[in-house]
Amino acid sequence: MAAEQMRQAGETNAKILLEPAGRNTAPAIALAALCAMQHEADPILMVMPADHVVADARAFALSAQAGAGLAAAGQLVTFGIVPDRAETGYGYIKSGAAFEGAFKVDRFVEKPGAATAQTYLAEGGYYWNSGIFMFRASVYLAELGQHRPDILKACEAAVSGRTEDIDFTRFDEAAFLACPDESIDYAVMEHTHKSVVLPMDAGWSDIGSWSALWEASFKDARGNCEIGDVLSLEGQGNYISAGSRLVAAVGLEDMVVVETKDVVLVAPKARVQDVKALVSELKAAGRPEVAQHREVYRPWGKYDCVDVGARYQVKRITVNPGAKLSLQKHHHRAEHWVVVRGSAVVTKGESEIMLSENESTYIPLGEVHALANPGKIPLELIEVQSGSYLGEDDIVRIKDRYGRA
């Protein structure tokens, strides 16, 4: 999805680093720093979480410029959000002595209780921990090597065994799986003498929960945020999102309703943090929704599994302009393709055919085949699979432009 968003934005030289598994922020940043050092002598890195919103872009940019100056001088900069309330959902940073327009970091503080958070707000000098950092790649790697050489060694081994394909850099799996799981706060920032906190007041929110997303979203006069096809009567203070169908609600108050193709979530805004407990229950029950989505993105586009039953499955397939699926075959299923939008070039064995809207073809079990979109608009087709086994692992790739096995 990230690669497709970059393509739509016109960025053709993006490099996306793919971890074989999650090992927290300290190793992730180490991989980025090591790769960046191979493309530029000693770049300044700005590290940001994906799940945040910034209301004042100009103030954010000015903070980033100030941080770049400190980073160029060899400091490890963390951006502390100026608090406007006694928030218990964030960790805090206690500032120390003033330092060149910022402050030395006194200490990092875990998420506090309500009374402690109120004390922090009253005392001043405490900032929300945004998880945003800026530093030279070499400085971070040096500090990581001093305080957690085991993490640095594992990441260096993972980078040395990397492979690249199109937008992606993939790291050696065995080396990275041996890496400890540790955050940058614990691994480096709490131990280094080079950490400084730079206050930022830019309307930042990490939107780390549905209630936080409601806070950051546009709301009507009754305090409702409604996204998609929503019909709500006599409700107030709700966050209602309809992803794929009509959501109708009557008399709801301070609720979160999120409808997706996979599942529907209904919870009071005050209880949305308990979603983690729901996920644990789903995992314990072995529910496929934890690991499998109905809509799945691929390097060439996406597919949506619209129906499935005994010995059959129906998918809506979208192929991006100029993209091509791998040359492949299946041992256990046959496929029918019907083009509903755009044009397709279909490889079947030794032959190649062109299909336009309302035209179709049949791929027998075991037939070597491929699908490409030669046009300038997305290709959309309906695929009907039939056979004894319909899993995604029944794909034998013979040739693939994206480097997949």
Image: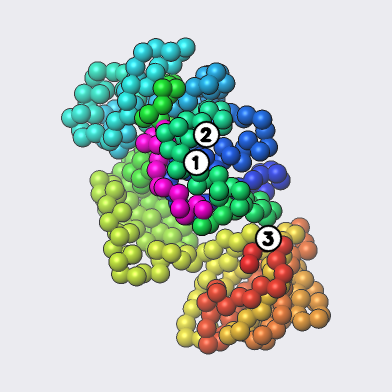
In the foreground, 54 or 131: 131
Q: Dividing the picture into quarters, in which one does residue 213 lie?
A: top left
Residue 366 visible somewhere in the drawing: yes
Q: CA distance from mark 2 to mark 1?
A: 7 Å
Query: Answer yes or no: do the residues labelled 2 and 3 have beta carbons within 8 Å?
Result: no
- Numbered tag placed on residue 141 in the rendering: 2
Q: CA distance from mark 1 to mark 3?
A: 29 Å
Q: Amino acid at mark 2?
A: Leu
What colouring does the structure picture have?
rainbow
Q: Amino acid at mark 3?
A: Tyr
Question: Looking at the image, is mark 1 or mark 3 earlier in the sequence?
Answer: 1
Q: Quadrant of the C terminus?
A: bottom right
Q: Amino acid at mark 1?
A: Leu
Q: Which residue is mark 3?
A: 402
Q: Residue at x 33, y 47 (%)?
A: 238
Q: Dividing the picture into quarters, in which one does residue 123 lie?
A: top left
Mark 2 Cα-neighbour bin, 10 Å: few <14, some 14–19, many ≥20: many
Image spot of residue 230 (x, y percent)? 42, 55
Check residue 185 for magenta coloring.
Answer: yes
Query: Answer yes or no: do the residues labelled 2 and 1 have beta carbons within 8 Å?
Result: yes
Q: Residue at x 20, y 29 (%)?
A: 116
What's drawn in magenta, residue-wise? 175-188
Q: Residue at x 36, y 69 (%)?
A: 287
Check residue 135 for magenta coloring.
Answer: no
Position of residue 19 relative to residue 90, above or below, is below
Question: Looking at the image, is mark 2 or mark 3 earlier in the sequence?
Answer: 2
- Numbered tag placed on residue 152 in the rendering: 1
Please state if 330 lies on the left or on the right of 62 as rendered: right
Q: CA distance from mark 2 to mark 3?
A: 31 Å
Image spot of residue 54 (x, y percent)? 47, 32
**Quick one: SS at disc 1?**
helix
Q: Residue at x 64, y 86 (%)?
A: 365
